[in-house]
Image (tube, helix red, strand yellow):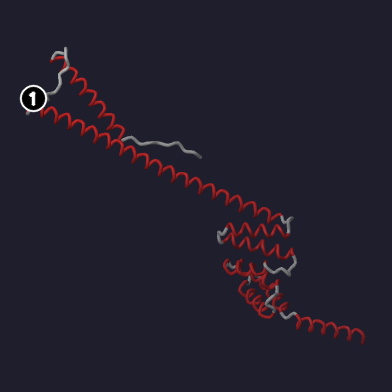
Amino acid sequence: MRRAIIFMLMSLLAVEVSAQQFPERRQVRKGNRAFEKGAYQDAAGRYMRALGAAPGSFEAGFDLGNTFYRQEQYDQAVQTLQQVAADSLAAPADRAHAFYNLGNAQFQQKKYSEALESFKNSLRLNPDDVEAKFNYAYVKKLLDDQNQQNQNDQNKDNQSQDQNQNQDQDQDQDQNQNQNQNQDQNQQDQGNDDSSDNPKEGEGQPQPAGISPAEQERMLDAIQAQEDKTQEKLKEKAGAVVRLKKNW
């Protein structure tokens, strides 16, 4: 009986010594009980007390980060889990879990590139984690799809710019052609006016030899008809829209 009492006293003494050496563990245990009940705010307070007693506690930091995540406080979760995952003294399996949860928090922030890197780091420490593999593949596919969509949008913008430039160039060419034709017509009209109204000796409009006035008139009518067709074609071209084929 006496030996049993002595053993109990020694056990209590060992617990007391352990509590003094690791004061954060009591708070962590209380935080875990609150976490399991869904009392996340109370749990977070317990984990913070544990970190106050032992700032380097991996367990307290890990649990605090998860509590922030459950409360959808993703900024605080990411900040806390980044510090925990960077603890090189922790066991590789524990750090792999920290990187995994960090990736989930970053995914909720829509920081997909950062989340992909966190899942990759988790797999480096624990290559057999099936869930980390799935999350890594899922986020990578999401990023690839986004990059492809961005490339498609860029191609559309480039095609739209090229189409507008081509239309502007066509319009400039049409305007130049119209101006040149108007100048030629004005010069021809001016020559006709000078020869009919103010004829000068030796400078009259040349007349084709061997062609009667009636034939000359028909030739002029044919030339005018061709000119009218040319003007119609230019008008149609000015209003045309250049359509390009899609290249994706």
Side (left or right) of 221 relative to 243: left
Q: Residue at x 78, y 81 (%)?
A: 18
Question: Going by the picture, which residue comes out furthest to the front?
Answer: 202
Question: Going by the picture, which residue comes out furthest to the top?
Answer: 210
Q: Which residue is mark 1?
A: 201
Q: Which quarter shows the N terminus?
A: bottom right
Snapshot quadrant of residue 176: top left
User: At which x and y percent is residue 68?
Assistant: 61, 69
Question: Going by the picture, which residue comes out furthest to the bottom?
Answer: 2
Snapshot quadrant of residue 242: top left
| Image position of 50 with respect to 178: above or below | below
Tell which of 232 and 200 is nearer to you: 200
Badge 1 crowding class, 10 Å Cα cut-off, few under 14, some 14 to 19, many 20 or more, is few
User: At which x and y percent is residue 246?
Assistant: 47, 38
Tell which of 122 and 184 is nearer to you: 184
Snapshot quadrant of residue 86: bottom right
Tell which of 43 and 159 is nearer to you: 159
Tell which of 173 and 233 is nearer to you: 173
Q: Residue at x 72, y 75 (%)?
A: 29
Q: Residue at x 21, y 31 (%)?
A: 184
Side (left or right) of 193 relative to 124: left
